Image (cartoon, rainbow, N blue to C red):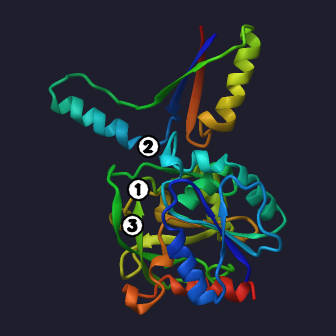
Amino acid sequence: MKAKVHITLKTGVLDPQGKAIEKSLDHLGFDGIGEVRQGKVIEIELAETDEAKARAAVEAMCRKLLANTVIENYAIELS
Amino acid sequence: MKSAIVVFPGTNRERDMAKALTLVGGTAPTMVWHGDADLPQGLDLVVLPGGFSYGDYLRSGAMGARSPVLDAVKRHAEAGGYVLGVCNGFQILAESGLLPGALMRNRDLRFICRDVHLRVETADSPFTQAYGAGEIVRVPVAHHDGNFFADEQTLMALEGEGRVAFRYCDERGLAAEETNPNGSRDNIAGILSANRRILGMMPHPENLVEPALGGTGGRPLFESITEALS
């Protein structure tokens, strides 16, 4: 089983890198760009085959290490 | 004062810190490796110095905060021990939950390496008692991720309990957007724990402790902690 963890900044947390990307896209002539937010994706291969157990394990990984929940949200995708 | 400095792979300010502690405190600190499960017996102060522990992988301080020695640092803190985290050390303290908030990428995305002015916001702590409240000092910063973030509730608690130790300002003491080098909320440069025995700060007081280094703005911090622990 494979887990894909999407980590994004919480609403209200300023994202200077997203802002820089937003400006750069505008500079390159892309119209209609709204707010840009940058995050990260972490892919994890898992030996676990039970989806509920895998999700619980990845949740724990997110809380303990992968995300800083002071500033970040996380979403888990299993396949 | 019996002190120790924790060294992680990628730490690079441990010798400056050892020099300052020895010069002002009179006793050389012990160096502790990040993989150690225990700290030396009878320690008063643990210092997490500056650098780039674990190459700043994942987030600055994230790996250091989960290294074996941090469990020992947490036990030391829970038993009322003193902890000082400077720069990467502050990032590790925030990542480990020993201090609230987070240190994010600098507002202008640039690595900042220069002297800044700080206003001492409280002299009521073992780290700042040799300063005067409101005193303005000059010390260097050298960081890419020093932009202090905390939610409104946490900020109110820090302000209400007098736990903001230092604020970025200009040479006259004006703390405003234009004197904020990295975008930190409310110009916060350093904060204290609830029991005031843990201090995390982005600037480097250990780099200005004798005139030959260009100033002594950081020296009272080491005088404070030496006095508190002697």
Q: CA distance from mark 1 to mark 2?
A: 10 Å
The residue beneath circle 2 is A14
Q: Quadrant of the N terminus of chain A?
A: top right
Task: Look at label 2 and name its amino acid.
Answer: Leu
Number of on-image labels: 3
In the rendered view, would you say B60 is above or below B205?
Answer: above
Distance between mark 2 and mark 3 Cα atoms: 18 Å
Q: Residue under label 3, please give it.
A: B176
* Drawn side of residue B107 relative to residue B193, left or right: left
Q: Few, some or many C-alpha atoms within 10 Å of disc 1 (few <14, some 14-19, many ≥20)? A: many
User: Which quarter of the rendering shows the C terminus of chain A?
Assistant: top right
Above-or-below relation of B211 to A44: below
Q: Would you call the spot at circle 3 few (<14 residues within 10 Å), some (14-19), or many (20 or more)?
A: some
Chain of the residue on which disc 2 is drawn: A
Residue to which mark 1 is pinned: B183
Q: Is residue A57 left or right of residue B84?
A: right
